[in-house]
Image: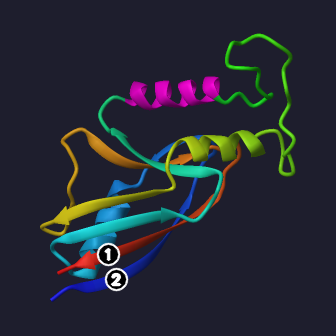
Amino acid sequence: MLRQSQHTLNFITVGEGLLNITAELNRALISSGMQQGQACLLCLHTSCSLTINENSDSRVLTDLSAHLQALVPEEGFRSLSGRGPLRPYLHDDEGADDMPAHIRSSLTSSNLCLPFQAGRLVLGTWQAIYLWEHRSRPQRRQLCLQLIGE
């Protein structure tokens, strides 16, 4: 018989970067008592995101962050050709990192849906789930985890 369980998970980030949240997600799975099914995760913010990536070599995470920073620079943007004037962002209500954080979260993902089996998320050997903070200062972040299974 299928069951559902919903959890709110809270995290405090240290500022821009990737936070491995795999262990916390697996703890929530264990507490549900479910053995197999689907785990759907939603980030309840517009300036951070979720991603699955390398959990062995921290240089991968450093390179990912550097690439996204280069793709969406804090000071504004130019045309894709790289020529033309720098255009500052219009939305800067919460500081210079505000609009770049929104763009970065739109380019990545705010939700994930993953299978779980034997009470644990099904991930590859070198995979982990990360909360990707796009703001420069520490933030309180909330995720909704919906479990459907048995």
Residue type pointed to by label 2: Ser
Residue 14 against residue 139 in the figure, above or below: above
Span colored in magenta: 58-71
User: Which residue is under mark 2?
Assistant: 5
Across and down, in percent, residue 15 comes to 64, 44
Label 2 vs 1, first from the N-terminus: 2
SS state under label 2: strand
Residue 144 against residue 46 in the figure, above or below: below
User: Which residue is under mark 1?
Assistant: 147
**Most foreground residue, 71 or 79:** 79
Picture quadrant of residue 82 = top right
SS state under label 1: strand
Q: Are marks 2 and 1 in contact (CB under 8 Å)?
A: yes
Residue 101 visible? The answer is yes
In the rendered image, the residue lying farthest to the bottom is: 1
115 relative to 11 in the view: left or right: left
Residue type pointed to by label 1: Leu
Across and down, in percent, residue 120 comes to 20, 63
